[in-house]
Image: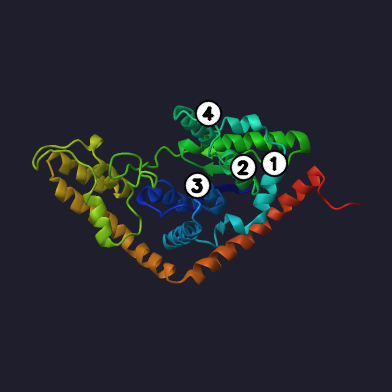
Amino acid sequence: MEKKRYLTGITTTGTPHLGNYVGAIRPAIEASKNPEFDSYYFLANYHGLIKCKDPAQIQQSTKEIAATWLALGLDTDASTFYRQSDVPEVTELCWVITCSTAKGLMNRAHAYKAAVQENEQSGETDPDKGITMGLFSYPVLMAADILIFNAHKVPVGRDQIQHVEMARDVAQRFNHHYGEIFTLPEAVVDDSVAVLKGVDGRKMSKSYNNFIALFSTEKALKKSINKVRTNLLEPGEPKDIDDSLVFELWQAFATPEQVSYMEDQFKAGIAWGQAKKELFELINGQLQEPRARYEELMAKPDVIEAELQKGAEKARERCQTLMSNVRKAVGLSKIK
């Protein structure tokens, strides 16, 4: 029986934080251990160019994210781990499907509509001011990322469902014109995966600068956890677990027994300082070993690069047959 192909991309624009780990990296690495899946994980550095114009940041983020996945135990022999720009078939396919993708479909993309709305609300006469073709065409590149391996399942957050649906539309339109080349992908949203809030109560995000870096030093981790927002309840006063960022973070890292323990502590009125101290010890205990591996990898960029090149070679082997079929379907094959 054919294995189900799973594909996940990580944009290279920042430093991995606890929200990335809990919401994407940890469940993806667990899924990669399932022998029934054929898993693909890539560093989306072409996507990174849409938002980031700093070459040094793109380079550093690529290094940090690759080291993070490797440090956390991704088995690159059992999965395919590669850098997007090392697989030229992706951008070739992107152009081919761009030529059959309806502009009206792209007009409906959430990111583009939000940028236009922001311009209109600010009084700009040109609704497209500052909007690049990279932002506008982002869903086509994402479709190429997915379709180049004919991925069956694409784990995403709810804000990315539209892009997977657009990839389906692109694939269906292409198949209608040129024959059954592409598998229709499906978005996979796991509601059991936590979406962590940042220290200020908003969604943990680099954009809000409210994140807790995944592999910061112990001292920096403790400092970040101490900044987590709490209320003015005194020690001894019962505290509500449903309205606590401290408990939310605890729950994301704790076993069921540890969750039950902290629930009891909240009912008993644990002091916020003590709760944060225990939270730090819990998270730090889980990150100590991978942090050491991460620091070792960051000091050996040649090791990271070798893993990415290994993954790129594997990725290209797996997508070249499909790309050959695409070229033949649209008339780009050799003259006979």
Q: Amino acid at mark 2?
A: Ala
In three-dimensional space, the C-alpha distance between marks 2 and 1, rounded to whole angstroms, equals 9 Å
- Residue highlighted by disc 1: 97
Point 9% across, 43% down: residue? 235
Looking at the rendered structure, the secondary structure element under dot 2 is helix
| Mark 2 in CB contact with mark 1 (< 8 angstroms) | yes
Mark with earlier residue (2, 1) = 1
Picture colour scheme: rainbow
- What's the amino acid at mark 4? Thr
Residue drawn where x is 53% and y is 67% of the image: 305
- At 66% across and 41% down in the image, what residue appears? 183
Q: What amino acid is found at the position of numbered circle 3 in the picture?
A: Lys
Residue 317 is left or right of residue 14, and the answer is right
Q: Which residue is mark 2?
A: 143
The mark lying in front, picked from 1 and 3, is: 3
CA distance for labels 1 and 3: 23 Å
Q: What is the spatial separation of the Cα atoms under label 1 and label 4, in whole angstroms?
A: 32 Å
Residue 294 location, x and y as percent?
A: 40, 65
Q: Between residue 96 and residue 29, name the one nearer to us.
A: 96
Work out whether mark 4 precedes mark 3 in sequence or the reverse, and give the earlier one.
3
Asked if disc 4 and disc 2 are in contact, CB closer than 8 Å, the reply is no
Task: State the residue position of label 3.
Answer: 51
Q: In the rendered image, which residue does mark 4 sit on?
A: 125
- Between discs 1 and 3, the one toward the N terminus: 3
Q: Residues within 10 Å of mark 3 (few under 14, many from 20)?
A: few
For disc 4, the neighbor class at 10 Å (few under 14, some 14 to 19, many from 20) is few
Mark seen at residue 279: none
Mark 1 falls on what kind of element? Answer: helix
